[in-house]
Image (tube, rainbow, N blue to C red):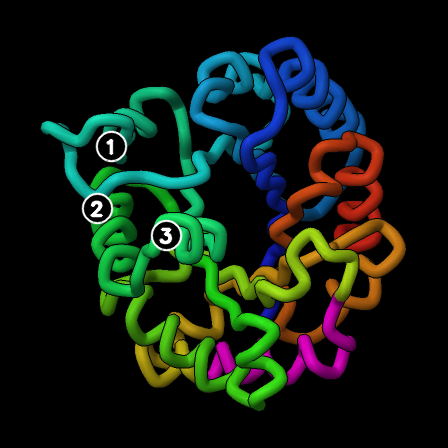
Amino acid sequence: MVRKKLIAGNWKMNCLSAEGMALAKDVAGAVKGSKFDCDFLICPPFTLLAMIKKCLRGSKIALGAQDVHFAEKGAHTGDISPLMLKDLGCGYTIIGHSERRVDHFEKDELINKKAVAAHNAGLNTVICIGETGEQRDAGKTIKVCESQIKGSVPDDATAKNTVIAYEPIWAIGTGKTPTAADVEEVHAAIRKTLVKKLGKATANKMRILYGGSVKPNNAKELLSLPDVDGALIGGASLKAEDFINIAKNACK
């Protein structure tokens, strides 16, 4: 099964207006002048979504948010609804990132509700899963990922509206990465779990990204693995050159 790779940048809580616009323009310019055979996604903070949308015009780079609420509207101070994101021009939203799971105590049930709401509003989701260092050391990586998929991914998710991102928590922003063999094993297990949950046809088409200290110097090895269909990039997405060089290593 050939799945078009997705190179996604998660800017997290970084960049003010001038810096964000400059970064987006640099990335958009590089993509416009290339023949990359892959999809691109940028997920800046909420405050930059409207202005970054303008910077990406004509570049074929999709715009995404870093989180979303499950309600269409209402008394939810500080939250953003799926319809608001759609209205801004977003095509995607990240859901269930480990920093949301840890910092905001988000559980699988809530992440599932967010995903359902996002899909109903016409948004695609990048649903994140991954284990802690302690869980890894205890040999529970596969079990944790299976549980998070079963709980977080809606039963009617499709390969068109859902992307899975495996991000081992212990590797995010630490410079540490699992071995290629480890990543291959986990991604294969994720695919098997998706087959059980969604059926073989859907699971074989669904993209599974790897995230966790992805850099230009390790991207080629990681993104050439059989069940790795792209990358969810954190720190390296804040430098246009690094982000594009990762794409060069992944997309012909």
Q: Tell me if label 2 and label 1 are in contact, CB under 8 Å.
A: yes
The image position of residue 246, as x and y in percent, is 79, 48
Rendered position, 76 above or below 97: above
**Residue range corresponding to the magenta coloring:** 177-192
Read off the residue under disc 3: 161
Q: Which element is circle 3 on?
A: loop
Marks 2/1: CA distance? 9 Å
Read off the residue under disc 1: 81
Q: Amino acid at mark 3?
A: Asn
Mark sitting on residue 117: 2
- The residue positioned 27% from the left and 25% from the top of the image is 84
Marks 3/1: CA distance? 17 Å
Q: Is residue 202 left or right of residue 98?
A: left
Q: Main secondary structure of the magenta part?
A: helix
Mark sitting on residue 15: none
Q: Reading the chain from its start, which is encountered first: label 2 or label 1?
A: 1
Q: Nearer the viewer, mark 3 or mark 1?
A: 1
Q: Is residue 66 left or right of residue 171?
A: left
Looking at this view, name the residue that lies furthest to the left.
74
The image position of residue 10, as x and y in percent, is 58, 40
Rendered position, 92 above or below 171: above
Rendered position, 229 above or below 123: below
Q: Amino acid at mark 1?
A: Ser
The image position of residue 108, as x and y in percent, is 30, 64
Q: Which element is circle 1 on?
A: loop
